[in-house]
Amino acid sequence: MSGGSITAEPPAAAAPPPVREPGLLRRYAVAAAFLAPAIVLLGVWIVYPAIYTIVRSFYGQSGGDFVGIDNYKALFTTSTITTAIKNNAIWVGVVPATITAIGLIFAVLTEKVSWALAFKTAVFMPMAISLFAAGVIWRIMDRQEPGIGAVNAVIGSVHDAFVPAGPLSDALPSGTNETGSPQTGIVLKKPLQPGGVALLGLTGIPPDQVPKGARQAAQPKPASGGITGVVWRDFKPGGGVPGKVETGEVGLPKVTVVLHDSSGKKVGSTKTGDDGSFQFTGLDQGSYTAGVGKDTFRKPFGGVSWLGGKLITPSIIIAYIWVWAGFAMVVIGAGLAAIPRDTLEAARTDGASEWQVFRRVTVPLLAPVLSVVFITMVINVLKVFDIVLSVAPESSQAEANVIALAMWRVAFPQNDFGLGSAIAVFLFILVVPVLLLNIRRFRREV
């Protein structure tokens, strides 16, 4: 051979043996083996308790007697449970929409500030603690005493700036020459003429309520064409004469003294000095009545009873919104970040204001995210429990009652598992339509 060599090609490799497909029974057995733990757990912890609860709701408290639908009738005839249903209706009507709205506002505003990270951290931080712990925090903040409750302390600082407390909280007339009370003011019974002296002695004043700077009460001297006087603490340790200014008795400073003429018209007002003295000058001839104005006895701000029966439900709702506003802000903020910026810029280019862009572009594009937050909140408030238990004191838990709390209180402290099971089934029936709506929305998006 010339011009090259001939190379023999290797023999063709044999085809691999066919792989046998596992049988149908084997495939189902493998799938069942993987699903068995989850199925067992679901059956033990969800399916069996749900079926047993439904069956148990048709029996009485002891479980031995069949009562039919009597437990369900009791849902709408027992005052505590009807209160719980009404409160849950308030929760569903107020909380989901409010949280969604606040989350939307926060999400939009944080895109426009440089300190957005710090703001988001502060708003989302309540989500890091349990609802029970958040309830304990708000129970302390809502205390009625302004010295303890932070909410009333803030309100009190504003209140006292416009309506300051009087120098005296309580006082009584020291003798028979005065009449009246702290609610109406204390006045002299005997009218005065110009040149007269008004002695306004007060008693029933604890030592810690004597205004600072009080000095020995002055004995007033008559003044021509005017009325002089003194307001003093008519009390002397060891005894004394009522209605007489004595050594050891202090004047009451900063007390408002009001002067009225014979027709009852107010003609003057003044403040007492450190020794309790006061004076009205330039008076016309006639009869006048002097007295301590009721503003002197105005009590300091005592606080709003946030934990009382009338305001307990709004107080708990505010605490709940405080916790969940961060969740809504983060979820809506994620949806806002996914909106194409070209769409927003196009709307601004067409002349739309920021409000129009927000209302007609941003909100419609965020509708799926807003519905997620809203529906999630509806489900949560239907089964709200722990924050109500931790915020409401024992004295007002009946007014703050909700369905989940009523179920627990009836079933366990009262040991009425029949009625408790009926409440649980009723709560489940309320939640099911919301769950079906959520599932339908998920299928529509897929």
Image: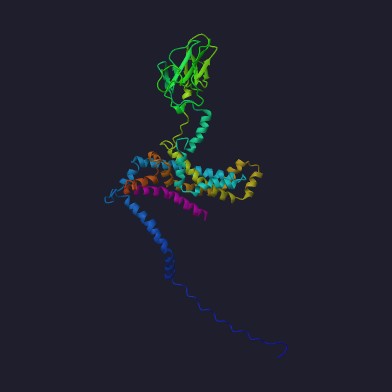
**Front one among 115 and 366:** 115
Name the image quarter holding the N terminus: bottom right
In this rendering, does residue 94 appear at all?
no
Range of residues picked out in magenta = 420-446
Question: Which residue is at the far right?
Answer: 3
Question: Which residue is at the far top?
Answer: 285
**Front one among 428 and 62:** 62
Number of numbered discs: 0
Question: Residue 269, percent across and down?
Answer: 52, 18
Quarter of the image holding residue 356?
Answer: top right
Residue at the spot 32% in from the left edge and 46% down from the top edge: 414
From this view, report whether residue 426 is shown above or below residue 14: above
**Front one among 181 and 133:** 181
Please name the colour scheme applied to the rendered image.
rainbow
Question: Residue 283, percent across and down?
Answer: 53, 11
Residue at the spot 62% in from the left edge and 48% down from the top edge: 343
| Dominant secondary structure (helix, strand or loop) of the stretch shown in magenta | helix
Q: Specify whether residue 6 is painted magenta.
A: no
Q: Specify whether residue 433 is painted magenta.
A: yes
Quarter of the image holding residue 50?
Answer: bottom left
Q: Is residue 193 left or right of 358 when viewed as pictured?
A: left
**Front one among 446 and 271:** 271
In this rendering, does residue 171 appear at all?
yes
Question: Which residue is at the far left?
Answer: 65
Question: Residue 81, percent across and down?
Answer: 36, 42
